[in-house]
Image (cartoon, helix red, strand yellow):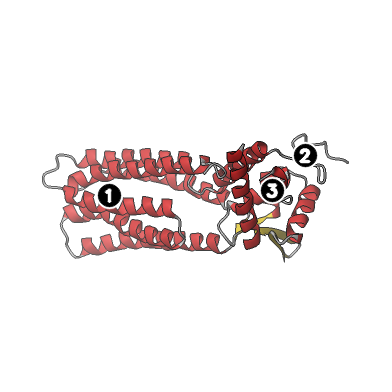
Amino acid sequence: MTAEELDPLIHVPTRLKIVATLAALPDGDALSFTRLQDMIGLTPGNLIIHLRKLEEADYISSNKTSNGSVSITRVALTGQGRAALDAYTRALRSLLNGL
Amino acid sequence: MTQPPNPNETVPGHDSPLDPHEAAAMLDQATQQARRRFQPNPPLLNVFRAFVVLAAFGSLWLSVRGQHPYTGPSGWAIAVAYVLVAVVIGWSASALKRSGAGVTGPAQRARNIGIGVLLVGWILVYVFQAALYKAGAPHDIVYGLYPATAPFFIVGLAGAANSAGREDWPTTATTLAVAVVAAVAAFGGPIDCWLIMGIGLCLAMLGNAAFTVWQQRRSVVRA
């Protein structure tokens, strides 16, 4: 196995942090955009770009709710995203064991 | 107005490629940070709880030691216990609120419902104590064995069932340990049950704190 075979969507620092953070939540739970932004330390614009890429691959799902004038976006790791992170972790482990 | 650049921030499309070691370190770091920040029972809080139960039950035991006949804990010991418990409740509520900020979903909802049911159960245990008093039960039961052990036995078992339903095994083990300590302490009689509870609960809390530290630091890559 080579580093090139690692899932390119996750094998990027920012998206790796996003996926690892969401994976620490129990299955099905979602995190608000603002808390995720606070934990990752990105500007809203940059975070949106990375989230969009993960959402296009169906690794995360997002849900926007509005309560009067306040709207809250929540992000959750999908089953496919969790499986992709598990596969990525296994691949990384076997790669490190082979080094 | 433009925001100053954040040196730690990566630019989309320009994220530098990771070598496997960097990726493993980053994955572990992000996972461990998230586990710490989503943890409603941080190890430091559990260490504090451990010493609080030891101090509270220790003072209750000191105040009943040598009583013949048994009359129950003195006012100063009850006041010390109440103040310490109030501090623990305040810290616990703050930790719970901080860890759950921005988190929604079935697991979060189940946890909140579980906490609500346990609080109601805790109050009902003391209502039952009043019923024992009204029925004329002796002081060594109403002010000794029952308040020292029954709340922890009942709420410990209910907490274990709730945590097991959520597959939260560390909390299941701790709450089950609390119920076991309460069952064992009841054999110590109305005086020594306070001391056994203090030591037993302290050990259970310290065990939970140690396990949480290990769990938070465990590598996901080098598992």
Identify which residue is drawn at 31% across, 62% down.
B127
Q: Quadrant of residue B67?
A: top left
Question: Pointer 1: what residue?
Answer: B181
Does residue A89 appear to the left or right of B68 in the view shown? right
Q: Position of residue A38 (x, y in %)?
A: 68, 45
* As drawn, B110 above or below B7: below
Disc 3 and disc 1 in contact, CB within 8 angstroms: no
* As drawn, B146 above or below B208: below
Q: Position of residue A40 (x, y in %)?
A: 69, 44
Q: CA distance from mark 3 to mark 1?
A: 49 Å
Q: Nearer the viewer, mark 3 or mark 2?
A: 3
Identify which residue is drawn at 21% across, 56% down.
B142
- Extreme residue toward the left, this view: B68
Does residue A72 appear to the left or right of B105 in the view shown? right
| B125, B172: nearer the viewer | B172
Question: Circle 2 marks a residue in which chain?
Answer: B
Question: Pointer 3: what residue?
Answer: A6
Identify which residue is drawn at 18% across, 45% down.
B191
Question: Of the residues under marks 2 and 1, which one precedes in the sequence?
Answer: 2
Please state which amino acid type lies under the numbered disc 3: Leu
Q: CA distance from mark 2 to mark 1?
A: 54 Å
Q: Secondary structure at mark 2?
A: loop
Please state which amino acid type lies under the numbered disc 2: Ser
